[in-house]
Image (cartoon, rainbow, N blue to C red):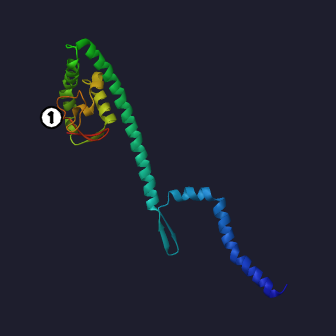
Amino acid sequence: MTPELINAIAAFIGATAWPAIAVFFLVTFRGAIVKMLENVSSVTFGGLKAELSKVKGEKEQAERRADEALEAEQDLEIENEVLQERVSSAIEIDRGLKTTNDGGDGLAKMVERVTKYHTQLKNLFQNRKGEKLTTAQIRDIVKSSSDLKTVESWVLPSDHCSNHSNRASCKCAGTPDAVFERLKRGHYRVL
C-alpha cells in the first residue's frame, strides 16, 4: 500500500464517518427525539429556521375537535335520558288524560306541562343573558334550582327556543318570549 492510497482511504472514512454516526444516533434515539420535538415550535440550524407551529396547531385543533365530539356525545346521552323520561311521562299522560279516541288531548297536556315551568326557567336564566351554554350546563343549572330540580325531565332547552322546537314544546318556542336561541346541536345562547 502506498501512502497516497492510505491517505485516500483515510479521507473516505473521514468523509463518511460523520453521516454514519448521525444516522446511527437518529435511529437509536428516534423515540426520544420525537418526544422532544413534539413540544418544539421552531428549530434553527445556523441560518436556517424551520417553523413547526402548523403541526403543533393541527394537533391542538385535533384535540379540540375530539373534546367537542366527546361533549356532543355526552349531550346526546343526556338528551336521550331526558327523552326516555318524557316518553314515559307522555305515555302516562296519554293513558290518564286522553279525552278523545284519537288521543289529540294528550299532546295538548304535554304542551301544558312543558309550558307550566316556563316562568321559573326564564327567571332562573334572567341573569345569564347572552351566555353560551351546552345542554349539560343548562341541565346542571336546572338541577341546582329548588323550583325545577324535581321536574328537570320536562325542562329541555330545545323546548324553549326562539329558532328551534320539539313537537310538544313550550308555548314560548318561536316567540320573543323564548328563553334560548339554538346555536348548534347541544349549544344555546340565553336570550
Mark 1 neighbour class, 10 Å CA radius: few under 14, some 14 to 19, many 20 or more = some
Q: Secondary structure at mark 1?
A: loop
Determine whether, in the image, residue 117 is placed left or right of residue 86: left
x, y (%) of residue 37? Answer: 53, 59
Residue at 33% in and 26% down:
83
Q: Which residue is mark 1?
A: 177
Task: Give left or right: position of 4 versus 158.
Answer: right
For residue 191, above or below residue 105: below
Residue 48, percent from left and from top: 50, 73
Q: Residue at x 19, y 33 (%)?
A: 173
Instruction: Looking at this view, name the residue that lies furthest to the left.
Output: 176
The N terminus, quarter of image? bottom right
Residue 28, placed above or below residue 134: below
Q: Position of residue 12 (x, y in %)?
A: 73, 79
The quarter holding residue 124 reads: top left
Q: Nearer the viewer, residue 49 or 115?
A: 115
Image coordinates of residue 95 in percent, x first then y, are 27, 13
Q: Which quadrant would residue 81 be assigned to in this image?
A: top left
Decide which of 69, 14 is in the foreground and name it.
69
Q: Residue at x 30, y 17 (%)?
A: 91
Placement of 120 over or under 191, stated as above or below: above
Q: Quadrant of the C terminus?
A: top left
Amino acid type at mark 1: Asp
